[in-house]
Amino acid sequence: MIKKSLDAISEEDLQAMIDNSVLEGKTIEYKQSLPGNSDTDKKEFLADVSSFANASGGDLIYGIVEGSDTGFPVRLEGLAIENVDQEIIRRDSMIRDGIEPRIPGIGIKAVNLSDSKVALVIRIPNSWISPHRVCYSGHNKFYSRSTNGKYQMDVTELRIAFTLSETAAERIRRFREDRIGKIFANETPFPFCETAKMVLHLIPLISFNPGQRYDLGEITSGLGKMPPLSCNSYNSRFNFDGFLTYCVSIDGKTASFVQLYKNGIIEAVDGLLLNPRLHGGLIIPSVTYEESLIGWLPSYISILKTLNVELPIFLFLTLIGVKGYSMGVKRSILVNEADKIDKEVLMLPEIVIESYDVTAKDILRPCFDSIWNACGFPQSLNYNEAGDWVKK
């Protein structure tokens, strides 16, 4: 796989692969031309794509000529495509309809070349819901990859793949539950103010790979990139787990912090948004808490993008110590006094981020709706019928 984000790949990067004789293998495959329209060609294309997803992920590159017997790239020939956008849509549709289950996080980029042609790079992630099968036109097979290219998976490999997929999801759930338990018990980097808390987790699937570590230097050199929720001024320091930013309340306790773990996990904990002293009681400020999360989430996602963290990323929102809280709304809105949260901890369902080109208000809406549900409302009242966040 090319060691760059998909959007950043240029003609120079592709030419460098040729100049450096980067061998085709488990995570890279070169193709001189796009597959044709026959069923055989389409099945071959889908087998190539699914094999990457069922293995370690990788880049499928069209427009590079490889040696007939060597697997080395020899020439950047490019593709003469009349309508590039239409071709990308066609390939994306073919992948979506021809492989089950759908592979999350696939990206397709057309790299413009100096001779007015293009190269097409399809980036397939190592899927967390593998194995995937080709289901096009009666085809029903599973493929994976080795250093020698793709091959059909046998029964033993399929059994292992299904087991590993379940294990990955379980690791993520266990990590979240363990962290929420410790935060609930105030086992935090610094003594935390004794208020209800809002906890945001961004957990990349790849973080649980053995030995997964990131260089945090680029992030820590720009402290404005990782602000704690609800804080305009804050402190920072390295710690055993990675890098921490935090702010303190008037009693000297931590009021909000963000922990960036060395393996790419981000944990943001806030004790101000739900502080009853600031809102006149056990009230969830119906606009402020949504506005804060919508405002800060892009900063945290940007950190992971800067670190070139592989997708997908699981987003979790949790409210701690909120039993008896109700949603703060205008008096003109009818509120049943019985509509108070009846749980001490609200662990909202996960949201899967499959692309860095996401909008915070859209990603977070299911979380917001769930919190309003817990307070007796059918959905967040801050969205209009078109799905826009309008701060009602």
Image (cartoon, helix red, strand yellow):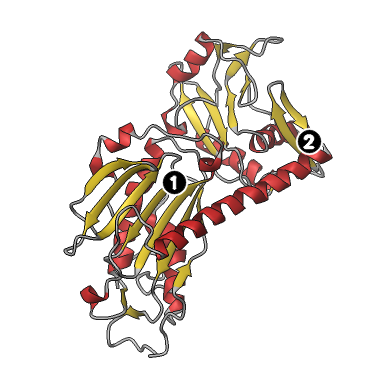
Q: Amino acid at mark 1?
A: Ile
Report if residue 136 is visible in the image.
no
* The one of 344 and 29 positioned closer to us in this rendering: 344
Left or right of 8 in this view: 229: left
Q: Which of the two residues, 291 or 349, is positioned nearer the viewer here?
A: 349
Q: Which residue is mark 2?
A: 153
Q: What amino acid type is highlighted by mark number 2? A: Met
Instruction: State whether residue 40 appears in this view.
Output: yes
Q: CA distance from mark 2 to mark 1?
A: 32 Å
Numbered label tally: 2
Residue drawn at (27%, 68%), measured in percent from left and top? 288
Q: Residue 337's image quarter? A: bottom left
- Camera-near label (2 vs 1) is 1
Q: Which residue is mark 1?
A: 265
Residue found at x 21% / y 57%? 248
Q: Where does the N terminus fall, quadrant-wise? A: top right
Looking at the image, residue 378 sits to the left or right of residue 141; the answer is left
